[in-house]
Image: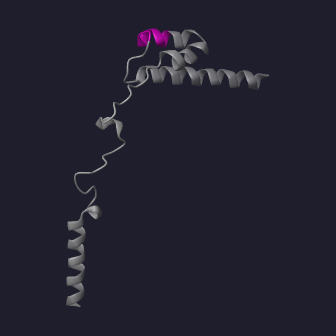
Amino acid sequence: MIRAFVFLVLAHLALVIAAVADCLGGEHAPRKLTRAWWVLIIVFVPIVGGILWFTVGRAKPPRPQPGSPRGNAGPRNPKGPVAPDDDPDFLRDIDRRLRDDNKED
């Protein structure tokens, strides 16, 4: 019985810490109330406060518009080489140096 009680207390503590951290650390403004009110609700309303934050209060990030640059994970056609081993000029230069070194031997 004591183990179950300790587990429930630790689970509640984890929920409160996660909810408060998410509330204070988000870059988008919360829905319905201000951050201060949400922190008070999370801390003083056991279990339900954290659940309410994650279901009702947490702001959903805006959806990217089709064709906007933020909607893509990365550039589809990069402007140039990303790393030296992706640069054709760099690779040609290394190949030329290796051939020149082999000719001298």
**Residue depicted at 47% across the width and 19% down the height:** 58
Q: Position of residue 44 (x, y in %)?
A: 55, 9
> Left or right: where does residue 104 sit relative to residue 1?
left
Q: Residue furthest front?
A: 66
The extreme right residue here reads: 1
Q: Is residue 75 above or below residue 18?
A: below
Q: Position of residue 41 (x, y in %)?
A: 52, 10
- Quarter the C terminus occupies: bottom left
Vertical placement of residue 77 versus 85, above or below: above
Q: Which residues are magenta?
A: 32-40
15 sits to left or right of 82 = right
Could you say where residue 23 lies in the image, as x and y percent from the top left?
45, 20
At x 37%, y 42%, the residue is: 73
Quarter holding residue 2: top right
Q: Nearer the viewer, residue 15 or 100?
A: 100
Main SS of the magenta segment? Answer: helix
Look at 24% across and 76% down and name the residue there. Answer: 95
Q: Position of residue 96 (x, y in %)?
A: 20, 78
* Corner quadrant of residue 14: top right
- On screen, residue 18 versus residue 27, left or right, reads right
The front one of 66 and 50 is 66
Q: Can you say which quadrant of the picture contains the N terminus?
A: top right
Q: Residue furthest bottom?
A: 105
Instruction: Look at 40% across and 24% down and name the residue there.
Output: 26
